[in-house]
Amino acid sequence: MSATVFTAEEAKKANIELITEEAKGRQAVHDVVVAMRANRRRGTASTKTKADVALSGAKPWRQKGTGRARAGYKSSPVWVGGGVAFGPHPRDYSKKTPKKVKVLAFRKALSERILAGDVLVTDAFVVAEPKTKKFLALVAESAKDARKTLVIGNGFDENTFLAARNVRTAQLVRALDVNTEQLLAFDKIIVTKEALTTLSERLA
């Protein structure tokens, strides 16, 4: 199986409109990636304040006459075992992004990778046996000198999926599911010809 560089001319033939203006879409890419990462945050970090810790509210010692600093309660944040001042509490980090911004960001990211020569096209991506070694050899044959490789297809058979699932330097993703962050996170992107049609439909 051989893979060839997907050029801007071929993108035009595949009805994929590229963004050639450098500034157009850059802010959209930033906004979408930030929102995606924020939406993955669980926001469950929680600490106890001085009102929440299970300690007595009694005054540790009398106000005057001991020679020590005055203290009002044992749950003070300055004491070991006391509450936490200004600590994290459960919150929602999610951000909403307009659909048009998402499409613009996706188009911009794909355009940049195509214009940089990082997108490769192949007829099909199939591993005959469910062996990691076979998968790595196929990736190395298609995308030489790439540390991380993204493979985009309309779908993958069970052998290909099983062969790739333990490989951290490569990822299989469907053309319907690939997102802006994934397009930017890999050195090379391998796309099957069938997946190109799906990508063009997503951008139509």
Image (spheres, grey):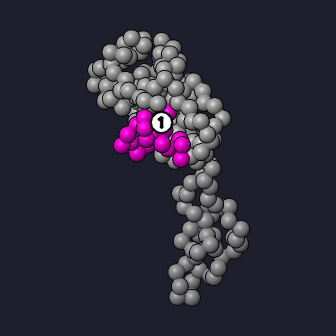
Foreground of the two, 45 or 20: 20
Q: Is residue 4 magenta?
A: no
User: Going 36% across and 43% down the picture, which residue do you hit?
Assistant: 145
As helix, strand or loop, the secondary structure at mark 1 comes to strand
Residue 51, percent across and down? 66, 61
Foreground of the two, 180 or 33: 180
User: Going 43% across and 30% down the picture, which residue do you hit?
Assistant: 2
Residue 83, percent across and down? 61, 65
Q: Is residue 56 left or right of residue 46?
A: right
Residue 89, percent across and down? 60, 52
Q: Is residue 138 magenta?
A: yes
From the viewer's perspective, is residue 167 above or below residue 116?
Answer: below
Residue 28, percent across and down? 41, 27
User: Going 48% across and 23% down the picture, which residue do you hit?
Assistant: 123
Q: Is residue 72 left or right of residue 26?
A: right
Foreground of the two, 28 or 16: 16
Tally of numbered discs: 1
Per the rendered image, the range of residues in magenta is: 133-151
From the viewer's perspective, is residue 52 above or below residue 3?
Answer: below
Regarding residue 27, the answer to whether it shows in the image is no
Amino acid type of the residue that numbered disc 1 sits on in the rendered structure: Leu
